[in-house]
Amino acid sequence: MTKKLKNWVNPEIPWKNKKNVPKIPPRILIDYATRCNLRCPMCVVWGSEDERKIDDVKGIMDVNKARDLLDIVMKTKPMIQPNLWGEPLLIPELEKVIFDLKSRNIPVVLNTNGLTLTSKICQLFISQKVDSIMFSVDATTAETLKKVRGIDKLEKIKKAVNLLLKERGDTILPRIGVSFTVQDTNKHEKDDFVKEWLGKVDVIRIGLMFDDSIGNYPEMVDMGKRKPCPALYSTLPIHNDGTARICCLDGFRKTNMGNVYKEGLDKVWNGEEFNKARYYHETGQWDKVPFCENCNGWAEFDYQEEVKDNHLIRFSPQYIYYNKIDKLETWTKETLGDHKEPKIKKNNIKKR
Ligand code: SF4
Ligand code: SF4
């Protein structure tokens, strides 16, 4: 323990440090391009009406500096998501970025709105064995999509999903999924959404919406007793300028855990700010971490599972995932993210 830690650990509430913190986080989110071609009302960053706030955070990451980060994590090869508060297909040097990651054998997953997907980009993802691509779809009708995402191009998004499915053919990777973030304007289409995509894609994700103004997921229920957030032990979100945030929900730089360019990625991850946050979580001092104080996102990770209709359904208070069983082999250890290995293995799953 450094001298600095003594300053903040309250001797009356000693830090038991129960949890093991890996030297390099197993999941890193790098915001190569904080830019987007949409302004979805639900989006923490682009849904804001405050243009000055958006101007403050938008930007492009220096690819050379990002490459230095990759060299640091080469030994452990964490899962990297090359997008965070932006649309990854708009990364200016996307091909270079994917090569940088995959030439180091790093597992890569990304979320996209699919609007600018082309055959060439599909081939890049397929040839480079990008591990997982999740398309945000969020609706089954153009009218609802307009309300949820501000555009009526549902057919274009669906075409993008189908293009990647077609181009992938019998190739194993990437794993392909669609997601639906439930909100007042689309919740009536949730069941139809699952019906529409079940069996067509490898995974469907249904999630709740985070409300930035109150700092939590207002629709979340059944969380149980609060516990330290697992994200603090697994996930490092890095902004385009190299500053690390406490969480992927912090789109507007309310927290600053250190700069990975200046201090080093491993030093930031194991540094005072993250350790403070872990200490306060572990000792139940939620008020000392204002960004987390009201949040219920820590319950996201409490997954249960069942098997139905040839799918492994995994659900927590925040998410439901429908994983196609005959595509489970592409849900590998490296791309599980915050999920545990499925208890049910492909070969002993009985159809119901
Ligand atoms: S597509 Fe994604 S990044 Fe872009 S505005 Fe919508 S939610 Fe935000
Ligand atoms: S408690 Fe909420 S805000 Fe804090 S790290 Fe977890 S998910 Fe993020």
Image (tube, rainbow, N blue to C red):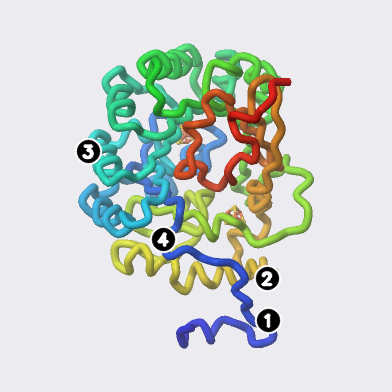
Residue visible at 29% across and 67% down? 262
Whether the residues at callouts 2 and 1 have beta carbons within 8 Å, the answer is yes
Disc 4 versus disc 1: distance between alpha carbons?
A: 27 Å
Residue carrying label 3: 96
Residue under numbered circle 2: 285
Number of residue marks: 4
Indicate the amino acid at tag 4: Ile
Residue toward you, 238 or 145: 238
Q: Earlier in the sequence, mark 2 or mark 1?
A: 1
Q: Position of residue 96 (x, y in %)?
A: 22, 38
Density class for disc 3 (Cα within 10 Å; few <14, some 14-19, many ≥20) is few
Label 3 to label 4: alpha-carbon separation:
24 Å
Instruction: Tell me the tag on residue 24.
Output: 4
| Percent coordinates x, y for residue 343 in the rendering | 64, 41
Q: In the figure, residue 9 lies in which quadrant?
A: bottom right
Q: Where does the image place residue 352, in percent across and percent down from the top left?
A: 73, 20
Q: Amino acid at mark 3?
A: Lys
The residue located at (31%, 19%) in the rendering is 118
- Crowding near pointer 4: few (<14 within 10 Å), some, many (20+)? many
The answer to the question of whether label 4 and label 1 lie on touching residues, with beta carbons closer than 8 A, is no
Q: Which mark is residue 73?
A: none
Q: Residue furthest front?
A: 348
Q: Nearer the viewer, mark 4 or mark 1?
A: 4
Of the numbered discs 2 and 3, the one sitting upstream in the chain is 3
Task: Determine the secondary structure under disc 4.
Answer: loop
The numbered mark, 4 or 2, whose residue comes first in the sequence reads 4
Which one is closest to the eye, mark 3 or mark 4?
4
Q: Identify the residue position indicated by label 1 in the image.
A: 13
